[in-house]
Amino acid sequence: MKLIQIIVGAGILVNSATLSFAQDRKTEQAIKHRRAGFTLMSTYFSRLLQTVEGDRPFNGPMVISDARTVETLSRLPWEGFVPGSERGDTKAKEDIWFEEERFKKLATELESKTSNLAKVAETGDLKKIKVAFEQARDTCNACHKEFRKK
Ligand code: HEC
């Protein structure tokens, strides 16, 4: 009887250790996911920045393609903001989980501004593209100011 109790007890211990390990892995993966998403998004976004700043010759089809890529990528980071992922290899501020609505609002705002940018890119009008680009960038900056550690 005693032996069985010990075995059962040990089993429970092992199980909860495995569970918390699995949880850590999940959190770690979520952080990696969102950071990778932001990194990719900024690769294409920076290319657009160079174009609107005049540091890269205007290439209409490429601008359309990059803007569409940014539009798609702007949907991806958010699922990585799972509860508990304020700790770890991350610059995310805890406020994200205390002010969830504000954070979600900025995320949705980015999505609509990148959609607008993708649409405006099709006009081939660099002046209009610059305005749409800057509107999207304002949202990047606003969110970083509020929710990302330096
Ligand atoms: C709704 C909030 C929000 C918006 C909008 C946003 N970001 Fe971020 N960004 C974050 C947070 C939070 C982090 C920190 C993520 C982490 O470390 O876990 C981050 C991190 C990053 C990083 C660093 C990635 C790394 O870990 O190396 C880059 C680059 C970045 N963002 C670019 C952008 C660009 C470009 C835009 C706009 C096109 C943008 N972000 C819009 C919240 C946002």
Image: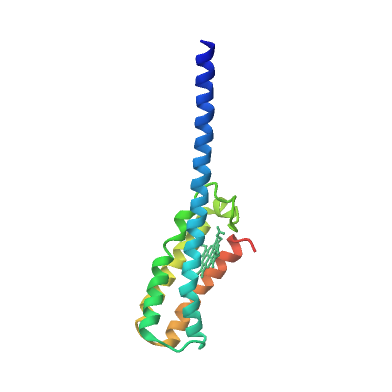
Answer left or right for 141 relative to 150: left
Which of 10/52 is in front? 10
Task: Give the vertical position of 5 relative to 127 (above or below).
Answer: above
**Is 116 displayed left or right of 88 in the figure?**
left
- Farthest-out residue, right: 150
**Occupied quadrant, residue 73:** bottom left
Residue drawn at x 43%, y 84% is: 128
Task: Tell me where residue 72 appears, x and y as whole percent.
Answer: 39, 67
- List x then y, in percent, for residue 17: 54, 34
Quadrant of image for the C terminus: bottom right
Residue 36 vertical position relative to residue 19 in the rendered view, above or below? below
Residue at x 53%, y 38% (from the top left corner): 20
Viewer-closest of 75 and 23 = 23
Q: Is residue 125 depicted above or below 29 in this figure?
A: below
Residue at 43% in and 71% down: 113
Task: Report the side of 93 relative to 30 (left or right).
Answer: right
Q: Position of residue 67 (x, y in %)?
A: 40, 75
Asked whether 36 or 145 is in front, the reply is: 36
- Residue 89 against residue 139 in the figure, above or below: above
User: So how many labels did they put on this image?
Assistant: 0
**Residue sitting at the far top:** 1
